[in-house]
Amino acid sequence: MDNMVTLEKDLNNMRGYYETEITKKCSWRESQLKGLRCFLIEKEEQILKALMQDLGKHQVEAFRDEVGTVMKSLNFALTHLKYWMSAKKAKLPQLALLTSAEIVPEPLGLVLIISSWNFPFGLSLEPLIGAIAAGNTVVLKPSELSPACSSLLAYGISTYLDKEAIKVVQAGALESEKLLHQKWDKIFFTGSARVGRIVMSAAVKHLTPVTLELGGKCPAVVDSLSSSFDIAVTVKRIMVGKFGACAGQACIAIDYVIVENGYSSTLVELMKVWIKKMFGENPKNSNTISRIVNKQHFLRLKNLLTDPEVKKSVVYGGSMDEENLFIEPTILVDPPLEAAIMTDEIFGPLLPIITVEKIEDSIKLIRSRPKPLALYVFTKNQTLQKRMISETSSGSVTFNDAILQYAADSLPFGGVGESGFGKYHGKFSFDTFSHEKGIVRRSFLTDFWYRYPPWTLNKFQL
Ligand code: NAD
């Protein structure tokens, strides 16, 4: 960002462009979504390279989580755009004779999207799809911690999209805070609760609506009464839902596992087998596990393990290589619940297993902690499933898998409580960046005299 004067001038120009009504046209929205699709197709190789450079993300994982998922969302938006934009009839009470009502979505105007580094394309482009589909002008601020991806995004968006309407600002925390103090019609933020609070405070000034996509500790509950086949699948899915999602640096990655105490040693043994199958005997040499994003996060994760009580609970892994920002997939059993590893979001390849006497006790444990973004429960037990849904609160609940819910266009994606508020994906993204305007059309007929002053009781004693 050159300076504030340039920024303010740019934003004024973007507001002026919005006023021309170009971005409201269906043809404009379609052309931008198609432009984004071209960017993903034509620059796929560079995108995968940038993800390897910034995060050491394997190209298969990178394609699955970023290019492939975003393409799916783009296609979904293009298929449904006209319907989303259309006015929807609303019902009125029968008393409202000769009156009709409808809901018309309108864009909000100039919106700001601030995203995180762990899925630099996915977390920038998913909300951008919604903002474009809804007809807004957009400033996107990707993370400075994934610089190769951010500069490719800046290049791609200025090359493939309408640069009068959509801009990428590459900025660190300080400049980002300056951005927040501008007037926006919506701020969509993905990141930590700490910065989420800064975003909300800044939004107060102009009463700007915000969506906060934050993080937290997502538990996975494992029911040991499952069959050995189901347990084998469970372990594989937990391993990929932790270590195979940017090495656990994902807001919906499994943070910790809850299991009955009599079963934890069996579970650990199975996990060891699958870690070796997935990442080899020496995971440091594996290119299928992402690296820690930078030294600061590496040291943060290292510190989580330095508490002697926590160290004692490590039953597998624990090796680290600071130079290569590598942390081995690590399993811990029953670290103290008050230690930082169990109070802070881990966001890395450390997997605590917390034991409870009966699996139903996991409900109490989950309820005693901040509401997670995602809850995973591996069980076929219908009663337990029902209790998990009704007795706990989380952004989403997934039974017998992890991460999968992120790809469902038909489901709202978002948090509750400290994991954030607001939702997106599919139609929810369109709604997040739209104002739903209520329209009422009355006839001049059926004009009853008693609805006008002067009020007299007689009117109601007909
Ligand atoms: P972060 O809050 O440090 O940064 C997020 C964004 O905010 C970045 O673009 C950063 O440049 C910007 N930023 C930082 N300080 C700022 C300030 N003072 N003012 C304005 N902007 C500022 O988070 P992060 O390290 O990028 O991401 C990790 C966190 O994000 C985790 O808590 C994770 O769970 C959460 N997350 C949530 C989701 C989700 O979809 N809910 C997805 C990914 C990550």
Image (tube, helix red, strand yellow):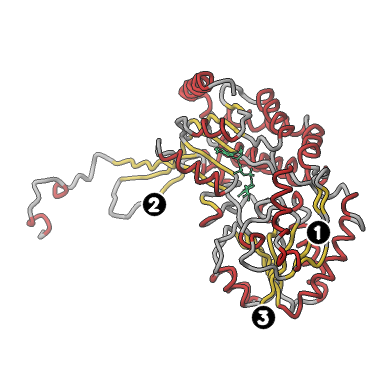
Mark 1: few/some/many CA within 10 Å (<14, 14-19, 20+): some
Q: Measuring 20% from the left and 44% from the top, which residue is drawn there?
A: 447
User: Relative to residue 216, is residue 43 depicted above or below?
Assistant: above
x and y, in percent, of residue 31 in the image: 63, 28
Q: Measuring 64% from the left and 63% from the top, which residue is drawn there?
A: 339
Q: Measuring 66% from the left and 39% from the top, which residue is drawn there?
A: 74
Residue mark closest to the camera, 2 vs 3: 3
Residue mark closest to the camera, 2 vs 1: 1
The one nearer the camera, 399 or 11, is: 11
Q: Measuring 64% from the left and 38% from the top, which residue is drawn there?
A: 124
x and y, in percent, of residue 357 in the image: 67, 80
User: Relative to residue 304, is residue 365 depicted above or below?
Assistant: below
Mark 3: few/some/many CA within 10 Å (<14, 14-19, 20+): few
Left or right of 35? Residue 265 is right
| Residue position for label 1 | 318
Q: Quadrant of residue 325?
A: top right
| Residue position for label 2 | 91
| Residue position for label 3 | 357
Counting labels gives: 3
**Disc 1 element:** loop
x and y, in percent, of residue 78 in the image: 63, 38
Q: CA distance from mark 1 to mark 3?
A: 27 Å
Tell me which amino acid carries mark 2: Lys
Tell me which amino acid carries mark 1: Gly
**Disc 3 element:** loop
